[in-house]
Image (cartoon, helix red, strand yellow):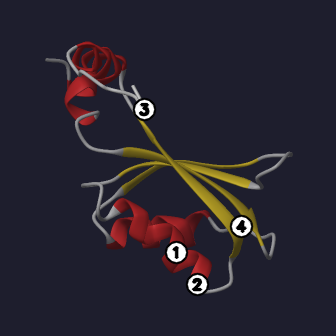
Amino acid sequence: MLAAERAWRKPHPLLRARGAHPEGRAQAARSCIESVGGQLHGFWYAFGTHDGYTLWEAPDNVSMPAVGPAISGGGALRSFETTVLLSVDETIEALRRAEAIRYRPPGA
């Protein structure tokens, strides 16, 4: 197994946010992410619906969602969205598992 494949076994959230006060916040984001055992891989600003994007590695799916509300609660964000990214292998495995699920729609 490649090192990159092993790294994707941890959650990799993409956080999209609208800031309340535009300024350089990469170090503040890094500190919050590292405080839950995560690692910041990138921080970008963009034009569009969201002002900022971070890509980071989280130790688990419990620590990950703690960061957005913590930052937002301090007034730094107007809104945020988190998307957990899946590796190609994880996506293929999920699709394989979906084939085995038997679902009955309501009323059927």
Q: Check whether the beta carbons of the residues at disc 3 and disc 2 lie within 8 A of each other.
A: no
Which residue is disc 3 drawn over?
Answer: 107
Element class at badge 3: loop
Tell me which corner region of the image, top left, top right, bottom left or bottom right, holds residue 102.
Answer: top left
> For the point 33% across and 58% down, which residue is it?
38
Of the two numbered discs 4 and 1 in the rendering, the one whose residue sits closer to the viewer: 1
Mark closest to the chain's N terminus, 4 or 3: 4
Numbered tag placed on residue 24 in the rendering: 4
Mark closest to the chain's N terminus, 3 or 2: 2
Q: Nearer the viewer, residue 103 or 72?
A: 103
Which residue is disc 1 drawn over?
Answer: 69
Element class at badge 1: helix
Of the two numbered discs 3 and 2 in the rendering, the one whose residue sits closer to the viewer: 3
Label 2 neighbour load within 10 Å: few <14, some 14-19, many 20+: few
Query: What's under tag 4, amino acid-wise?
Result: Gly
Quarter of the image where the N terminus is located: top left
Element class at badge 4: loop
Q: Would residue 73 be found to the left or right of residue 92 on screen?
A: right
> For the point 36% across and 17% down, which residue is it?
88
